[in-house]
Image (tube, helix red, strand yellow):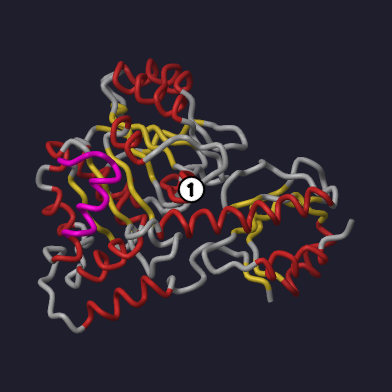
């Protein structure tokens, strides 16, 4: 069985597992106040060129998203979000459960939000009887593998500044976005252009874990208290710190992301050579082939994948194939013959 269902089907890279194992017998302080977290925080600050940034660790993407948004917003404030954004389509109302309304905006196949959409939507919410937009949420990479360029992020930053909006970047797959071919955006750019962003470990070689980076520490005031209140503080916090310490030592984080992208791109190229079209040509580790419905039963026999949704043409379906740090060239070359010419 070829496993392309997602990028968190496997445990962790051996170097990450080794770091966790070594930290296990040390007797570290709890709640993230330990040498591993401190070192990982410094590594991230250095890469982001943000020496004053507040950096904290969370177990998963949903907990960091709803905790951060709840911390940043007042009770009557809401969130502009791509309709396909993770907080809108895959988190069971977690953000709304904190009392903050999501205001979804439509996107194209790349999943990207454009400044003109934000500017067009703002007049609707001038009525004081409605929720006040205060934060713009985007994913980098998007849920369909789109990657915001530096210019695109700069444009979003500018429109947010012009309208007193915060910009929050969900980086669950940030590694693959930064490692995508042709990308020039860096962690330092994110620290300059976003009010907050996350660095995903769960989908890039960690057992679990996301880092929340807030370049201006004033925005992070009392974050630990609301993190604790929302059940997002891990008592054995060094287990997260040790993983990020390993990921950001000697470039491992980016090495794993480049590998995931390379495997997915080889698969995308191989399928293209067979005449298969795509919902969106992703430069990251997620690809979205459009296949005939008649192929699905046979494909399920040999491959774990996700059905993304119906294709524009009747009788076809968009599926998602995801490569990870554990995907091998043999996996890719072994799967390709199961797609007909």
| Residue found at the far bottom of this picture | 25
Question: In the rendered structure, which segment of residues is drawn in magenta?
Answer: 38-52
Residue in view at x 38 percent, y 59 percent: 201
On whether residue 51 falls in the magenta region, the answer is: yes
The answer to whether residue 323 is above or below residue 290 is below
Residue designated by label 1: 89
Q: Is 184 or 112 nearer to us in this picture?
A: 184
Residue 98 percent coordinates (x, y): 26, 48
On screen, residue 51 versus residue 314, left or right, reads left
Q: Is residue 297 left or right of residue 167?
A: right
Q: Quadrant of the N terminus?
A: bottom right
Q: How many numbered markers are drawn?
A: 1
63 is higher (above) or lower (below) than 168? below
- Residue appearing at x 22%, y 37% in the figure: 73
Residue closest to the eye, 98 or 16: 16
User: Up-down: is 241 above or below 171?
Assistant: below
Work out whether residue 310 or residue 263 is closer to the camera in this orientation and state it.
263
Q: Residue at x 11, y 63 (%)?
A: 33
Query: Residue 135 at x, y = what percent?
Result: 31, 32
Q: Is 214 placed above or below 243 here?
A: above
Q: Quadrant of the C terminus?
A: bottom right
Q: x%, y% of residue 336?
A: 78, 63
Task: Locate residue 311: give its quadrant.
Answer: top right
């Amino acid at each position: 069985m070829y496993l392309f269902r997602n990028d968190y089907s496997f445990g962790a890279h051996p170097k990450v597992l080794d770091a966790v194992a070594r930290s296990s017998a040390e007797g570290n302080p709890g709640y993230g106040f330990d040498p591993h977290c401190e070192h990982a925080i410094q590594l991230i600050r250095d890469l982001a060129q943000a020496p004053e940034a507040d950096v904290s660790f969370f177990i998963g993407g949903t907990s960091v998203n709803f905790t951060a948004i709840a911390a940043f917003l007042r009770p009557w404030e809401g969130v502009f979000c791509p309709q396909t954004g993770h907080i809108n389509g895959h988190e069971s109302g977690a953000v709304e459960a904190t009392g903050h309304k999501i205001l979804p905006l439509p996107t194209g196949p790349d999943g990207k939000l454009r400044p003109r959409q934000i500017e067009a939507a703002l007049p609707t919410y001038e009525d004081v009887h409605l929720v006040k937009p205060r934060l713009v949420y985007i994913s980098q990479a998007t849920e369909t593998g789109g990657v915001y360029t530096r210019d695109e992020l700069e444009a979003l930053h500018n429109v947010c500044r012009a309208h007193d909006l915060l910009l929050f970047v969900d980086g669950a797959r940030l590694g693959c976005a930064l490692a995508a071919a042709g990308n020039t955006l860096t962690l330092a750019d994110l620290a300059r252009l976003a009010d907050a962003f996350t660095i995903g470990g769960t989908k890039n070689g960690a057992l679990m874990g996301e880092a929340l980076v807030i370049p201006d520490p004033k925005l992070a005031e009392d974050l630990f208290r609301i993190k604790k209140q929302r059940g997002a503080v891990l008592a054995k916090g060094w287990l997260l710190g040790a993983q990020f310490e390993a990921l950001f030592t000697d470039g491992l984080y980016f090495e794993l992301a480049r590998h995931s992208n390379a495997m997915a791109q080889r698969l995308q190229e191989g399928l293209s050579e067979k005449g298969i079209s795509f919902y969106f040509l992703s430069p990251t580790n997620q690809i979205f082939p459009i296949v005939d419905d008649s192929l699905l039963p046979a494909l399920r026999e040999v491959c774990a994948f996700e059905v993304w949704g119906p294709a524009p043409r009747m009788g076809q379906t968009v599926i998602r194939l995801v490569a990870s740090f554990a995907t091998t060239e043999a996996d890719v070359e072994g799967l390709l013959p199961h797609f007909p010419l």
